[in-house]
């Protein structure tokens, strides 16, 4: 498994945008969630989003997947305006995968049957289903629990299962929502290694939002801070923790990495 470095090097990465928000605004009733925000995420990049509760991190995920549409602005994926595209097109044509914070699997199905159920829907060539499932079972070291019902798996095993389910379609963009929440230290380290390995082996663009700032910053190339409907700061982890606006809006003066 890959060794997690405190701050990862991104200079070798491509600078080709795969996800782009252009002047995106969104309100729920009288409450402004996103106010004319702009950012780009490059192909093959691990990108993190941080910010207080209710600031719009999950809303950005919902905008990328197509669950909701903005009131203003454009969402660009792989160079194409997808603002009005439905969820299934974002998934099938642009290969956007999503790992929710909670759930994402069938409780009463075994781990293997979970994989088979989703594979039947999203893998068109049925002769490839077994091969893909066997690969993911091996990759995430889940062979020994493949016949265990999902509700009886450990927290780390369930998280591995949901990530494996999202990878059945071989996505180009993978969204991880609060993936480090309520997990022990060893499981978080395991997930960090999985994230870095996915990038290195498959060049997947990975977008993570989480409240665990130290855990997130340990495995991303770039991160941004959201506050009061705006992007307060965006930079590499080492630069971001020194940014005055980021410290005032989110980290605080006492924040340290170790």
Image (tube, rainbow, N blue to C red):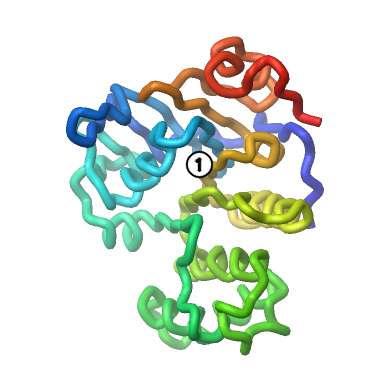
In the drawing, does residue 121 fall left or right of residue 180?
left
Q: Position of residue 82 (x, y in %)?
A: 25, 45
In the image, residue 35 sits, relative to residue 91, either above or below, namely above
Report which quarter residue 237 is drawn in. Answer: top right
Q: Residue drawn 69% across and 50% down?
A: 192
Q: Position of residue 201 (x, y in %)?
A: 66, 56
Q: Residue drawn 56% across and 42% down?
A: 210
In the drawing, does residue 96 fall left or right of residue 193?
left
Image quadrant in which the N terminus is located? bottom right
Q: Position of residue 55 (x, y in %)?
A: 41, 32
Residue nearest the viewer, comparing 58 with 82: 58
Q: Residue drawn 22% across and 36% down?
A: 28
In the image, residue 4 sits, relative to residue 88, either above or below, namely above
Q: Secondary structure at mark 1?
A: loop
Residue occupied by mark 1? 43
**Residue 139 visible in the snapshot:** yes
């Amino acid at each position: 498994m890959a060794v997690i470095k405190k701050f990862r090097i991104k200079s070798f990465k491509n600078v080709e945008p795969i996800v782009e928000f252009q002047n995106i605004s969104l309100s729920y009733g009288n409450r402004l969630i996103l106010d004319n925000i702009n950012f780009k995420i490059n192909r093959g990049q691990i990108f993190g989003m941080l910010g207080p509760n209710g600031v719009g991190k999950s809303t950005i995920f919902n905008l990328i997947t197509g669950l909701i549409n903005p009131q203003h602005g454009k969402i660009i994926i792989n160079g194409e305006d997808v603002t009005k595209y439905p969820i299934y097109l974002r998934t099938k044509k642009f290969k956007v995968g999503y790992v929710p914070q909670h759930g994402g699997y069938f409780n009463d199905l075994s781990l293997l049957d979970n994989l088979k159920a989703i594979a039947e829907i999203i893998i068109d060539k049925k002769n490839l289903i077994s091969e893909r499932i066997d690969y993911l079972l091996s990759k995430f070291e889940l062979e020994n629990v493949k016949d265990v019902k999902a509700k009886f798996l450990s927290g780390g095993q369930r998280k591995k299962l949901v990530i494996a389910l999202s990878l059945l379609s071989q996505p180009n963009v993978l969204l991880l929502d609060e993936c480090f929440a309520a997990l022990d230290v060893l499981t978080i380290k395991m997930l960090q290694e999985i994230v870095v390995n996915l990038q290195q082996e498959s060049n997947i663009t990975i977008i993570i939002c989480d409240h665990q700032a130290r855990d997130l910053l340990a495995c991303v190339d770039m991160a941004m801070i959201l506050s009061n409907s705006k992007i307060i700061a965006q930079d590499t982890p080492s630069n971001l923790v020194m940014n005055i606006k980021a410290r005032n809006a989110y980290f605080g003066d006492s924040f340290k990495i170790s």
